[in-house]
Structures are given as structure tokens and as C-alpha cells.
Amino acid sequence: MRVPVSWVADHLDLPSTDPDEIAEAFVRVGLEVEDVHRAPELTGPLVVGRVQEIEELTEFKKPIRFCQVEVGATDGGVRGIVCGARNFVAGDLVVVALPGSVLPGGFAISARKTYGRISDGMIASARELGIGSEHAGILVLPPGTAEPGADAQALLGLDDAVIELAVTPDRGYCFAIRGLARELAASFDVDAPDFADPAARVEVPHADRPSWPVRIDDAAGCLRYVARRVSGVDPAAPTPWWMQRRLLAAGMRPISLTVDVTNYVMLELGQPLHAFDATRLTGEIAVRRAAAGEKLRTLDDVERVLDPDDLLITDDSGPIALAGVMGGASTEIPETHEPGSTADVLIEAAHFDPATIARAARRHRLPSEASKRFERSVDPQLPPIAAERAAALLVEYGGGMIEPGRTDVGTAPEPRPVRMPLDLPDRIAGVRYERGVTVRRLRQIGATVELETGDDGKGLVVTTPPSWRPDLAAPADLVEEVLRLEGYDAIPSVLPAAPAGRGLTAAQRRRRAVSRALAEAGHVEVLPFPFVGDEVWDGFGLAADDARRRTVGVLNPIDADRNRLATTLLPGLLDALVRNRARGLEDVALYHIGQVVLPHAEPVAMPEVGVAQRPSDAEMAQIEAALPAQPVHVGVVLAGDREPRGWWGPGRPAGWADAVEAGRLVGTACGVELRVTKAEPAPFHPGRCAALRVGDWVVGHAGELHPKVVDALGLPPRTVAMELDLDAIPLTEARPVPRVSPYPPISVDVALVLAEDVPAAEVAEALIDGGGELLEQVRLFDVYTGEQVEAGRRSLAFSLRLRADERTLTNEEANAARDAAVAVAAERFGAVLR
């Protein structure tokens, strides 16, 4: 929200007009200042000019015009100026920067020869003058604004600063000068008559009949609908310059008188308005939900297919507006009219359900200034005031006439009183505020305050919140207002003493150990997007009955295409991998530790519990049972080279063994040794995937992704991944102590011939079981298939390292341990020594 200081000053006697002090005052009441746009640095002669003649220069590649501009007798009378803009005609008033002036950004103006003519100055646009972002054409002033030669700096209000604020969703009333002036009044601690509510200045006369028939069919979506009719409006009437100037400073482009008036009232009061061409309306206006398949062409000339949840404004011809978001093209007031014609305007001012408008704006990807305010809630008492204010402006500047009657259908919700102990803000903040502070601050936000005596003899504050503050519904909300306006900096910061003997839990220590181990091994931690769409499972090649397809939906998703909670970390990690590769990073090793959501096969109903007291044990048990499981997983994805290339030779690409090793590394960090067995789950490549087990329990998988998955997701060839359920690994405080022996080891190599479908990991496991305590390590170093081994079989060569803790091994002991290990492999798999 861009706030011109002069506009706020119309409604508040500011103690200071310094923009820095005003920005600081906004910060004191909890508003975030994004930027302070000071008055543009502009020097030299800047005058109003009238275009007398325009010569079109057609010999150049782009259209160029040589204009004769009257700039006043004191400035040389008429000057020739070259200009490329085409949004003005002879007779228009423009702003001329004469030679010697310097525009914002240090742009000096001088007389110079260009396009074969001498350009004696420059006709300026709003952006070049620093009063707006519009640069499509030069700034054209309304007729009669000033005489040629008048000082344009004072006319344009170039000394006016603008404060740009980031308004939080709970402060919708701050999307208006009305609300911001009230906040400044509280920040500067000024009361009436120094602050004048602009809504209170509008007199709403009594109306004995409706101005147009209106019917509300959906009372939940539209609580109130006001319509006011103004006839005989001159569609060619220019918007007064003072209004254009404020719209430009607020970041809006002036369009036409009718549009500018509705935008101005919205910025001033906070109530979005819409103007219909009454001559294009047929029959009664109805507010209802859309029917399936209905369509509406909106003002941006896009035909939109409507959803049954959309709230519509309709007449006998069908939908004429998407309520609270954008009007329809069929009832738009035309920008061009025949000379002498007038327009019949019907002004709409309504109060819509915030959630309904928010869903519609996101569904149609159609954010607007109106929807931005409606979805944050608008004062339900404003519609008749805003409609009357807009109608009066159209009469004053457009020559119209307000037709008798006003339509006001529906009922605005009444605020509910909130009771609060008088000393509650003091007790919550730990500060003893001065007497009367609580009542004064609550009245400053617009609340009605009465004092009572409670049953305990202490003072009670009975507060009726203002209609524009629906967020004030509990004593805690009132306490927050008092503390906010008194200043959070006045509340002492006292850190509670940390209880002795507490630290990280075992689960926290394990998670940090896993993260540290993966980072030390060269993996980079990422925080991927935690939501997925249903189509991702087709890319993963999951079966229709795969449990991972059973997900929990998000009611208000950030991304409509990814609105489900993930059951695995891989989709987010693979998205991060693709994004990094697209930005030129070829060799990628990423990891993430986070929760996944695994809903129950048979959903359990979530009980509805109140907030007056703690839920019962039975209710707590049902709540726990209804919640889906949310275990902590760790995932790893790798692509490109795992070992870089260099002068020593080519790099080594990441393979399935690296993914398995990442799983083993996680197991080591958790204090367990994972067993590796053969597995073939989607989305992994059959034959290049392993199950990671604790005992016989599968806790994860690692390996190379299936080529079809790689193609479907746009991944690099031979991408590998690992995912493991950390919560499935038994949590233990004991850490394995490394066995250190001062005695030398004995290395023995064995080559075993066995069926080629026997996994090497299971053979290694058999050797470990047979080798006993003396066997310290088993390592596979060669796999051979060829002429020396019969068809259907292969040779696996293992290196066995043997060592005793208390003595030097003899050859006989080493050979015995080797033979025992080979015997177990022979018994289990029919292995024979090669």
C-alpha cells in the first residue's frame, strides 16, 4: 500500500510531515515499512505547456512528432519539441521540462538537435517526473488545470513523499487512507478533533425506495449489497488533476472519471466499488453461486469457465461480474461515446465473504485491488457511505444527477462486546501502565468502551469493537491492541532461566548426527517444496493400489497444482535436482531430512472439541487416532560425477552403490549396521536397487531410478536415490565403540563361484556369520564372468581381514576362520572356491 503523506494529512493534523518520522510512527504500531519514496529531486524550470501544432515525421523507423508547444510568454512563447509519444493531441495541456532543468535520476535537459529538428525542451511522462510508474505516454493534464507557463512543480505536488507499507493479512482496514490515518493518530497519540474519520464526513441521506431491484440468493457469500444510481454522467469529463495525482502516487493509473472515482473511494475508505452501465443491465440483479459450465468474459477480455464455488453478480442475461474480483465486459461503461451523450451509472458497494473471494481470485489467478481487500475483510458498515461518496464525486465532476432511492439488501453483522479485566494488559505485559491507558487506547482504535465492576470487585472493560475490526473477538485481542499502541519496546525482555540438566533429546541428537554425516560426505542439504500433485505418482510408475498414492489434501494450498501432503521425500528432492541442473550445476548430491504424512487406510473421524476446557481423555485419544502418521525420513539424490575428473583421469559417475553407501552412512550415524538385500520397488530400476534393513525389518531403499521414471521427470540419466525411515530405526543412546587392536591383521582373499542371481551382499553376510569374532572386515573387490566360469554362474572375490584383540594370529587360525566363512557360504548358496 502506497500512502501519499499529503492524503493522510487531509484527515489528521500531523505533528510532523517528515517522511522518516511518519515511517517510524507506522513501525511503532506494528506496520512494516517497505520503502520511503521522498519527493523527487528535480530542479530548474518545469512549466505547464499547451500543444499548438503537431508535425508527423514519417521518414524515420519509428513514429516521431515535432510539436509546437506554448510555454508562456516569460519562457519564450512557443517552443519546438521532438516527442515520440502519441497519447496527446493539439490543444492538450502537458508538462514541459525546459532547458536547464534536471529531472529525477540526474537527467539534464538541454536544447539539442535530434531527428533533424532542434528540440528545445522535453514533454515529460509521469515516470520521468517521479510521480508514477506509467511510461507508455506523456502526462496529459485535464483542461483548465492551469495556464501555459504556470509552475508545474507546485501543481503536480512534487514535494509530496510516499510511504510504501506491507500490510499483513489481519490488518485489512490498513488498505485505506482511513485506516492508516487512524493508526497514525494512535501512534502520535492524538485524538479528535485532530483526527477526522473520512467516512464520518459523508452524509448518507434517507432513501425511501430502492434504486434497482436486487436479490441475494446466497446470504453466506454476500451479507450486504448496496446500489446507488447516477444518471447523466458526462463520459468524456476529465478526472480532476488532484485526484489523478493521488492515484498516481498510490500506484494506480488514471483511466476515466468513473473508474478513477471508484478507485479513489476504495483507496480513501477501503470499500471496493464497481460501476455498471445501467443501460446494459436487464432485469433484477441477483447474487448467487455459479452453475456448472457457466462462463463469464471479464474486463480483461478473457472468457472464464466458472466454478460452482464462484460467487456471481447476475441479471436476466446471466453473469455480469465475478463478485469481489472483477466485473464483466458486457456491462462495462464504454470509454468512447458519441459527442453530447451521457452515461447512466449504477454503483455497486457490497460486503462479501472473505474466504469465498479469496478462493475465487486464486482459482482464476485473477488478483485485483478489490479481491485483495475483500479477502482481508472490509467494514460491513461502509457500503452505503462509499456508494454515496462516489455518487457525489460523479455529480461534482461528471455533471450527473443522483437518482432518488438507494438499494440496501442484507444485514451487516453486528460486533459482539468483549469483556476483559481492566488490569489484564498490565498482567500480560508485566508492566504497570498509567491509569486510563487501556480505555484510551481502545477508544483510539474506534471501539466503544464502558467500565463495570466484576463479581470480585475489580474493574471490567466492556468493549464493542469497531465494525472494521472483526479480528477483535477475545480479551487477548484487546490486550494485543493496548500493548501494540503503547509500544512493544516498553515491555521488558526477561529471559526465563533455563532448567538445569536438559538438552537435546536422543531423537534430536540422532537427526543432527545424520545431517552432519551426510554433509561431511559431500551432500548438500536442501529444503524442497513439501507438497505434491497426484500426477507425480504416474511419473514414479506407482501401481494404482500403492500406499504412497494415498495422500492428505491441503484445504488452502499454496500451489493449486500441488495440493497434497507428500508420502515420500523423493518428489521434492528430484525437483530440487532438476532445478539445480537447469542452473548449470552438473554434479549434484542433495539430501533432506523431514517428515512425510502417511494417512490411515481406514480414516478415523476427527472429533469437534470446544475451547472452553481441556478435551477429555477419550477426545484426546480420538484426536491422536485421527491424525496421520508423520515419521521422519531422510532422502538423498545424486546425479553426475561422484568423484570429479582432473589431471588424474576421468571422473567417476554416481551409481547405485553410492546411494547404498549413503544409506549405510545414515545407519552408522544412528548406531546400527544396516543389512543390504535385493529389492525391486518403484520407482527404482530392477536389479539396481537394494532394501536397507535393520534385522529383518525394511527401513528404506536405495538404488538407481528406473529409466522410464528418469524420462518422465526430466532427470539426468542414471540418477540414483535413497530414502530411509529414521523413526523405524531403534533409538539407542549407546554408540558402538570402535574395536582397536594393537596386533597386526591378516588379509586373506577368497574367490567363490556361485549362481549369478545370488546377491553379493547376502554372500558377504554368510562370510561374516561363518568367520566369527576374528573376521574384522569383508570387502568385495572383483566380479568375474567369462570363459573360466560356466554359464549362469559368476565369481565373486572377497578380501577378508582377520585380527585378534589379545594376540597375533597364526596362519593356522586365519586359515581356519577363512574355511569356516567359506563353509557357511557353501552351505547357503552352493558356493565353491575358485
Image (cartoon, helix red, strand yellow):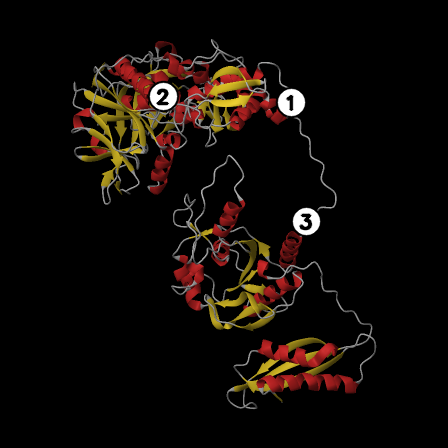
Q: Which residue is mark 2?
A: 381
687 up-or-down from 532: above or below: below
Question: Residues under labels 2 and 1: Cα distance?
Answer: 36 Å
Q: Nearer the viewer, residue 235 or 196?
A: 196
Q: Could you tell me if residue 732 is visible in this image?
A: yes
Which amino acid type is marked by label 3? Answer: Leu
Q: Position of residue 243 (x, y in %)?
A: 35, 18
Which amino acid type is marked by label 2? Answer: Gln
Q: Quadrant of residue 758?
A: bottom right
Q: Which residue is mark 3?
A: 504
Q: Nearer the viewer, residue 681 or 341?
A: 681
Residue for point 41% across, 31% down? 376
Q: Which residue is mark 1?
A: 431
Which amino acid type is marked by label 1? Answer: Val
681 up-or-down from 177: above or below: below
Report helix, strand or loop for mark 2. loop
